[in-house]
Image (cartoon, grey):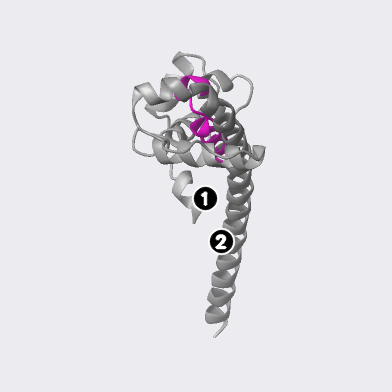
Amino acid sequence: MIRKVFKKKPSGKSKIDAFLEKYKLPKAYLSVNRRMITRGVAIGLFWGFIPMPMQMLAVMATTPLLRFNVPIAISMVWLSNPFTMPPMYYVEYLTGNFILGQEGIEGIELTMEWFTEHFDDILVPLYVGTAFYSIIVSGFVYVLLNRLWIRSVHSEKHERKTTRDENKSKNKD
């Protein structure tokens, strides 16, 4: 299940281990366990929802404060890309207007002139909506992934026990 996908590791010392030792990086940045993976997903989504340049640098700046799987976090940031950003930020803007109880701007145009003229009107609702999505969605995904991972481990243990019991009963016959 979920855990098996991330747990496949080659045996012995790999190039990744040599790289970590050479640059004296903590192994936690590439750890494959429930805590590191779920934190990486949550932190990557958190920064991915925020409209700012250099989101990957923000993930890297977070690494000394919180330990998480860095490649997973960076890949989650990539969910906000040039194709997904316009609809994502528009929904954040609409949500911000809803939270603030404001009406949105009518007649939106996708031109630089229009955005420079209305930048002050867009900024506050956009970042209120951004705060909502980055905190709520990343928190929800963190909890959901934790629960799914734990359920996966329990079902895997149950399957192993069932298989073991079946094998014992076949051997007795």
Q: Position of residue 14 (x, y in %)?
A: 40, 29
Which residue is pictured at 60% across the width and 61% down the height?
157
**In the structure shown, which secondary structural element does the residue marked by tag 1 occupy?**
helix
Q: Marks 2 and 1, Cα distance to the nearest angstrom?
A: 10 Å
Q: Position of residue 80 (x, y in %)?
A: 42, 35
User: What amino acid is labelled 2 in the image?
Assistant: Glu
**In the structure shown, which secondary structural element does the residue marked by tag 2 occupy?**
helix
Callouts 2 and 1 close, C-beta under 8 Å: yes
- The residue nearer to you, when weighing 16 against 148, is 148
Which residue is pictured at 39% across the width and 25% down the height?
114
Q: Is residue 45 magenta?
A: yes
- Mark 2 or 1 closer to N-term? 1
Q: Does 66 appear above or below 33?
A: above
- The residue nearer to you, when weighing 105 against 163, is 105
User: What amino acid is labelled 1 in the image?
Assistant: Arg
Q: Is residue 133 magenta?
A: no
Which mark identifies residue 88?
A: none
Considering every residue shown, the one lying at the far front of the view is 106
Which residue is pictured at 57% across the width and 42% down the height?
95
Q: Name the main secondary structure of what is drawn in magenta.
A: helix
- Report the span colored magenta: 37-58
Q: Position of residue 117 (x, y in %)?
A: 44, 21
- The residue nearer to you, when weighing 135 against 28, is 135
Q: Position of residue 137 (x, y in %)?
A: 58, 43
Which mark identifies residue 3?
A: 1
**Pointer 2 residue:** 156
Considering every residue shown, the one lying at the far top of the view is 23
Q: Does 171 appear above or below 24?
A: below
Q: Is residue 131 left or right of residue 82?
A: right
Q: Is residue 152 left or right of residue 22?
A: right
Q: Does 153 appear above or below 113?
A: below
Q: Quadrant of residue 127?
A: top right
